[in-house]
Image: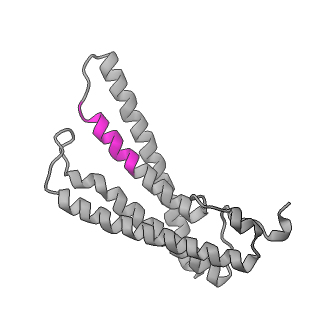
Amino acid sequence: MFILAKWLGRLATATLWLSGIGLVLMTAFTAYQVWARYVMNDSPSWTEPASVLMMGWFILLGAAVGVRQGYHLGFDILLIVLPVPARKVLMTVSDLAVAAFGAGMSWYGLMLAQGTWASISPAIGIPVGVSYVPLVVGGALIALFSLERMARRFAGLEISDAELPPLDQVA
């Protein structure tokens, strides 16, 4: 379990780096678009679709790491008043729901990518299906990291995230 946790930690770090690179690239593409439009008076047609593609990557990869760290959206008010064992059950149910969502996102993203792969984007000259690949990868990572959270909880390992403190520490 420790080797797998270490490997998944490295995967999460690499995923976060790729997400950051995507954010930087999107920002650079947008800055180039503005500069080319207003300084050169010649707007390139590829910058907007490339920026949107980068945005898909950095949002979905970042979301997957957020799931691993426990920063995804949740309704925590009930968890504050429950005893720790009941909290763990509800957190596991939440992780199951997030894993199912990630798996569905990955599956249907794959269907979208396959269904649109034959069409070529005129602006950037790549298959339209490429824009759905972040759904596939991000969804798979969301499911994987949710399953890791459950496995760590069942193994009694620490989950380094934003989970709530024990009830006796709540003021």
Residue 120 percent across, percent down from the top left: 15, 48
Q: The magenta stretch spans which residues?
A: 45-56
Instruction: Please tell me which residue is depicted at 67% across the width and 77% down the height of the picture.
Output: 88
**Quarter the N terminus occupies:** bottom right
Q: Main secondary structure of the magenta part?
A: helix
In the image, residue 26 lies in the stretch drawn in magenta: no
**Above/below status of 51 relative to 142:** above
**Residue appearing at x 35%, y 40% in the figure:** 51
Left or right of residue 82, residue 18 in this image = left
**Which residue sits at x=44%, y=66%?**
141
Q: Could you tell whether 122 is left or right of 77 in the image?
A: left
Magenta stretch holds residue 50: yes
The quadrant of the picture occupied by the C terminus is bottom right
Q: Quadrant of residue 121?
A: top left
Residue 84, image x, y percentages: 75, 76
Decide which of 120, 163 is in the foreground and name it: 163
Can the viewer see residue 6 in this picture? no
Q: Position of residue 128 (x, y in %)?
A: 21, 51
Write the residue at 26% across / 54% down: 130
